[in-house]
Image (cartoon, rainbow, N blue to C red):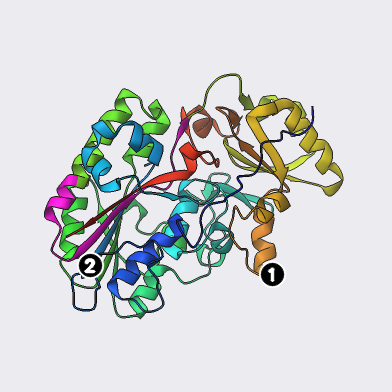
Amino acid sequence: MAPATHPVPPEPSGYGRRSLADLMPSLAARLGVPGMADVLGLGGGVDGDGTDRSALMLLVDGLGAALVEEHAHLAPTLAALTAGRSLDAGFPASTPISVASLGTGLSPGAHGLVGLTMNVDGHVLDTLKWTVGGRDASALAAPEQIQPYPTVFEQVRAAGFRPVVVSSYLFANSALTRAALRGADYRGTVAHGDLAAAVLDELRVPGTLVYAYVSELDTVGHVTGPGSPAWQFQLREIDHLVALLVDGLPSGTLMTVTGDHGMVRMAGDAVVDYDETPGLQEGVRLIAGEPRVRYLHVDAADLAAVRSRWADVLGDEAWVGTRADIESAGLLGALPQGPRGADVRSRVGDLVVVATGMGGVVRRTAEPVVSSLIGQHGSWTDAERRIALAVHHT
């Protein structure tokens, strides 16, 4: 069988126009931060110069646009504030990649977090936990070196404004926070109640940009599947949180709510176990990524044979292409020039395998937890890449 012919999306994530990376700079622009542009056209503004007094971005992990549209009756506040708006997550559509795009205002190819797991000098770095082989890797792969560019928060603070992150206290000093969210004051929380209280308290100070994060919708979706009864109850609870925030916002606040990716149910014979399929292992020096997007690092002499074998096994359920295919299609955005660009390219597989149906490539022996999850994401399908965008002005 020839390699699957699913085309790379003709229009990659709208970097610079409608992508997740454009959201925080647009909010900063609404506060009047020099050098930032409201490319999303969020509008609003109550002061004489048309700016907003404070701005909020609530990141609801897993808030896919298609899921909100399908379950609008369960989330009336979100549905009303979204009003058909959406953004594109970057590629792959996963949490650490999207958080880095939000925090830096850069595409994945620029900020360099290009996989849930990715090759760093021959080691498979888990960019969510920042571990290699289950052990802390912050010394092996310093977050400030993996992602060296100034964050939006650092730029906001340098301009004399006040950046704040409100999220679980567990993430306050995490490596991902250091890579993507450094430069902000951090307010640690333990539940949605104190998150709401902290957010509203911070927004009362003019010139404040708040980034808030909740994870539970994603967690429930992974475990029980998006659209499950448990997931529906969780969506209703998130909608109530959004309504509470809307009711408590001080005058002159621009509030946005978005996600970092959507989610699909992965099931059936199209789910293939790499660890139990010797034909897939042959010629692969290192495998990274996640079930819906796999990075295969192979020797140049083996590339064509490995690509053919993977295409034979996965068939029409996946696209199997090269790093050059992904880069030329613009899926990662523009990569830096020089050594930095070469370093980022080395983190992407020589071959990239993207699930386009309901399947994926799991590793039940090496990655038992991730492989057991019902809900998955990462691919460029509409359900995974397109994320909701709610906007509200007071």
Q: Assess whether residue 255 is covered by the magenta stretch.
A: yes
Q: Position of residue 91 (x, y in %)?
A: 55, 49
Q: Quadrant of the N terminus?
A: top right
Amino acid type, label 1: Pro
- Which type of secondary structure does the marked residue at label 2 adopt? strand
Report x, y in % for residue 199. Answer: 21, 58
User: Would residue 102 appear left or right of 236 to someone viewing this image?
Assistant: right
Question: Is residue 101 depicted above or below 370 in this figure?
Answer: below
Say which residue label 2 marks: 54
Q: CA distance from mark 2 to mark 1?
A: 39 Å
Q: Between residues 25 and 135, which one lies in front from this camera angle?
A: 25
In terms of image quadrants, where is residue 311?
top right
- Residue 89 image offset from top left, x and y in percent: 47, 50
Q: Viewed as shown, does residue 259 lie left or right of 336?
A: left
Q: Identify which residue is drawn at 33% across, 37% down.
A: 68
Q: Residue at x 69, y 71 (%)?
A: 338
Q: Is residue 135 above or below residue 333?
A: above
* Residue positioned 43% across, 61% down in the render: 22
Q: Is residue 64 visible?
A: no
Point out the stretch of residues depicted in magenta: 243-264
Residue that label 1 marks: 339
Using the image, determine if residue 108 lies above or below residue 32.
above
For marks 2 and 1, the one nearer the N-term is 2
> Callout 1: 10 Å neighbours few (<14), some, many (20+)?
few
Q: Residue furthest top?
A: 269
Q: Quadrant of residue 154?
A: bottom left
Pick the residue in front: 66 or 294. Answer: 66
| Residue 223: in magenta span | no
Q: Is residue 284 left or right of residue 336?
A: right
Can you say which quadrant of the picture contains the C terminus? bottom left
Which numbered mark, 2 or 1, is in the foreground of this view? 2
**Tag 2: residue type?**
Ser
